[in-house]
Image (cartoon, rainbow, N blue to C red):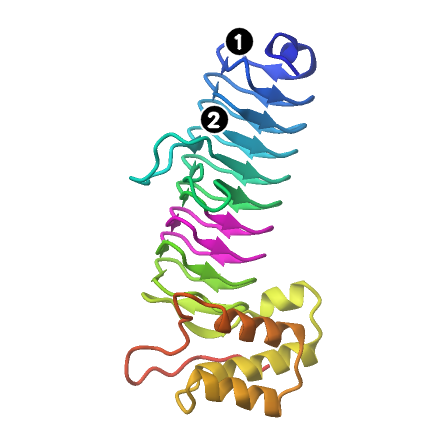
Amino acid sequence: MTSSALLEKSSIHPSAVIHPSAQIADGVTIGPNVVIGENVIIGKNTRIIANAYIEYAEIGENCTISPFSTIGSEPQDLGYKGEETKVVIGNDTIIKENVTIHRGAACGDNTTRIGNKCLLMVGSHVAHNCVLEDQVILANLVTLGGHVHVGFGAFVGGMSVFHQNVRIGDMAIISGFSATRQDVLPYSKGDGRPAYPIGINVIALKRRGVPQEIRTATNQAFKLLISENYNTSQAIEKIKAEIPMNEYIEKMINFIQTSKRGVLLKHNKAGHTPQLSEE
């Protein structure tokens, strides 16, 4: 839709500034002092509340963009020379106040990606070329360095910090004020600096209907992976020999074997005793 026809199909405050290249679908609400810059696409029924700033971004349907959030501004990458890159955000995602999402640097697919049904709480930061899968939650002030990949359904606690190129596995949950330079195992509960694994995220598995026998086998595999009695290769061999395989165990093993930064599995302080679920 052209900018001249926007007011017919959408609710746009007269103080909003909208670039002629913007494509805005029916039912969009744009509040006071919003700035919509170049190369923006906004899907149906998305709300953009006062004072938000958006450029070089594709935003899906039924999203909420809160005041003073910034989407699509230039990446904090000294190698970036003005190449045309972008942010892509899925449907039903909520971006709260003061969130910053930088567009991609000129590498990979040149894109920063946020999935469907994500929640980015106040002040969280998503750097260039990050990928957040569907249903990810970032609590207040989470900071993701460039190229971080956050798996489906992961929850990251407030004020946590992640080095560039780190992967956070599916349905991992990380407590607030954590940090890591290594990958975080899928389905694990991470805590601390670094965010070592202390158990399996049983609640997330239950909520997604994973049967108890699958949860139990997955937890048994997890205990072997973090055991001080075995190195990672030995633990994987023992899992394959002794525990019935399932898709969750296979994903954990594949995640470890494909890691480029290494997966944090052992605590680095003597005397630590993980608090494991009995399930």
CB atoms of marks 1 and 2 within 8 Å:
no
Disc 2 residue type?
Glu
Residue 72 seen in render: yes
Q: Position of residue 116 (x, y in %)?
A: 62, 45
Q: Position of residue 203 (x, y in %)?
A: 59, 67
- The one nearer the camera, 211 or 257, is 257
Mark 1 vs mark 2: give the one in front. 2
Structural distance between the alpha carbons of marks 1 and 2? 19 Å
Q: Quadrant of the N terminus?
A: top right
Side (left or right) of 226 relative to 29: left
Q: Is residue 190 above or below residue 40?
A: below
Disc 1 residue type?
Pro
In the rendered structure, find residue 14 and report the number of the disc placed on it: 1
- The one nearer the camera, 226 or 104, is 104
Side (left or right) of 231 relative to 188: left
Q: Position of residue 253 (x, y in %)?
A: 54, 75
Side (left or right) of 159 relative to 249: left
Residue 70 seen in render: no
Could you classify mark 1 by the number of other residues whose Cα lies within 10 Å: few (under 14), some (14-19), or many (20 or more)? few
Q: Position of residue 14 (x, y in %)?
A: 53, 9
Helix, strand or loop at disc 1?
loop
Helix, strand or loop at disc 2?
loop
Residue under the point 42% across and 80% down:
274
Does the magenta portion include 232?
A: no
> What segment carries the magenta color?
130-159
Could you classify mark 2 by the number of other residues whose Cα lies within 10 Å: few (under 14), some (14-19), or many (20 or more)? many
Residue annotated with mark 2: 55
Residue under the point 63% across and 13% down:
2
